[in-house]
Amino acid sequence: MDDLVTVASFPDVAEAQLARERLELEGVGAFVIDAQVAGVMPFLTNSTGGVRVQVKPTDLERAREILQL
């Protein structure tokens, strides 16, 4: 299985989930990482790099286009 790469990070879970849903609507599988940390200990979100959205390396460029990064 391919490793996942971070396509974007967000300050909160809601924004990350919206990005994940947008990617999946376009056929790109995506995962939200560190949502639990942000929900339980939001003060740690910045120190952990935010709530990350990750995709397969082969989907990275397409994901960036979709999210317009």
Image: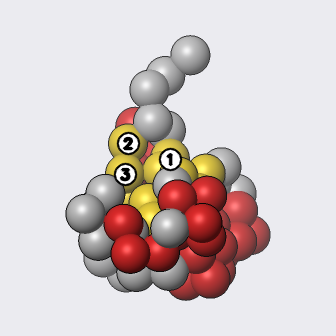
Number of marks in picture: 3
View extreme (top): residue: 1
Q: Element type at marker 2?
A: strand
Q: Element type at marker 3?
A: strand
- For marks 1 and 3, the one nearer the N-term is 3
Q: Amino acid at mark 3?
A: Thr
**Marks 3/2: CA–CA distance:** 4 Å
Q: Quadrant of residue 65?
A: bottom left
**Which residue has dot 1 on it?**
55
Which quadrant is home to the N terminus? top right
User: In the drawing, does residue 37 fall left or right of residue 28?
Assistant: left
**Marks 1/3: CA–CA distance:** 7 Å
Q: Amino acid at mark 1?
A: Val
Query: Residue at 29% across / 71% down in the picture?
Result: 46
- For residue 18, above or below residue 64: below
Q: Amino acid at mark 2?
A: Val
**Residue 37: x, y in percent?**
52, 59
The answer to whether the residues at label 1 and label 2 have Cβ atoms under 8 Å apart is yes
Q: Quadrant of residue 16?
A: bottom right
- For residue 30, above or below residue 43: above
**Which residue has dot 3 on it?**
6
Q: Element type at marker 1?
A: strand
Mark yes or no: residue 10 visible: no
**Marks 1/2: CA–CA distance:** 6 Å
The image's mark for residue 5 is 2
- For marks 1 and 2, the one nearer the N-term is 2
Question: How busy is the neighbourhood of tag 3: few (under 14 within 10 Å), some, or many (20 plus)?
Answer: some
Query: Residue at 44% across / 60% down in the picture?
Result: 52
The answer to whether the residues at label 1 and label 3 have Cβ atoms under 8 Å apart is no
**Residue 44: x, y in percent?**
36, 66
Pick the residue in front: 65 or 4. 4
